[in-house]
Amino acid sequence: MIISKKEKLKMIKDKNKQNALNEMPLSINDFFILIEYIEKKLITNECNNNFKFSNEFIINNNLSVEIIIAWFNELGAFCDCEVLFNIKDIFFKNKE
């Protein structure tokens, strides 16, 4: 059976999503709320290339800053806007 390039890319994306879910250091519910929180903050504030809003949420919800930020970094996010563009897309990107 020959697998097309598009099918291979989908398989890689699905595997990346599953790996990210397996290693997620917060509940899926907290993750969705965090994404919403960052989105609202970035409507009226610029991203300063840091985790200002992520840290606010994490601290206010008694979660582990070090562990969650390390998870963000592993998934290619190094600031709040990259959490939205890189990590959020893993979970919300439309299937091609």
Image: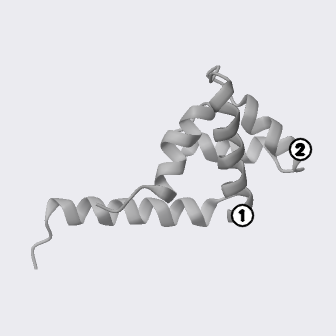
Whole-number angstrom distance, CA of label 2 to CA of label 1: 15 Å
* Residue 57, x across and y down, in percent: 80, 42
74 displayed left or right of 3: right
Between residue 63 and residue 95, name the one nearer to us. 95
Of labels 2 and 1, earlier in sequence is 1
Amino acid type indicated by mark 1: Asn
Estimate how packed mark 1 is, as few (under 14), some (14 to 19) or many (20 or more) residues with alpha carbons within 10 Å.
few
Q: Position of residue 9 (x, y in %)?
A: 27, 58
| Marker disc for residue 60 | 2
Q: Name the residue carrying label 1.
A: 29
Q: Residue at (34%, 61%) from the top-left corner? A: 12
Q: Residue farthest to the bottom?
A: 1
Q: Secondary structure at mark 1?
A: helix
Q: Is residue 93 left or right of residue 40?
A: left
Task: Please state which amino acid type lies under the numbered disc 2.
Answer: Asn
Residue 28 at x, y percent in the picture: 68, 64
Left/right of residue 14 with respect to residue 42 in the rendered view: left
Residue drawn at the location 81% of the way across and 44% of the way down: 58
> Do residues under tags 2 and 1 come within 8 Å of each other at their CB atoms?
no
Q: Residues within 10 Å of mark 2 (few under 14, many from 20)?
A: few
Query: Could you tell whether 1 is left or right of 84 in the image?
Result: left
Q: Which residue corresponds to the image point at 38% horizontal and 59% vertical from the top-left?
A: 94
Q: Is residue 46 in sight in this rendering?
A: yes
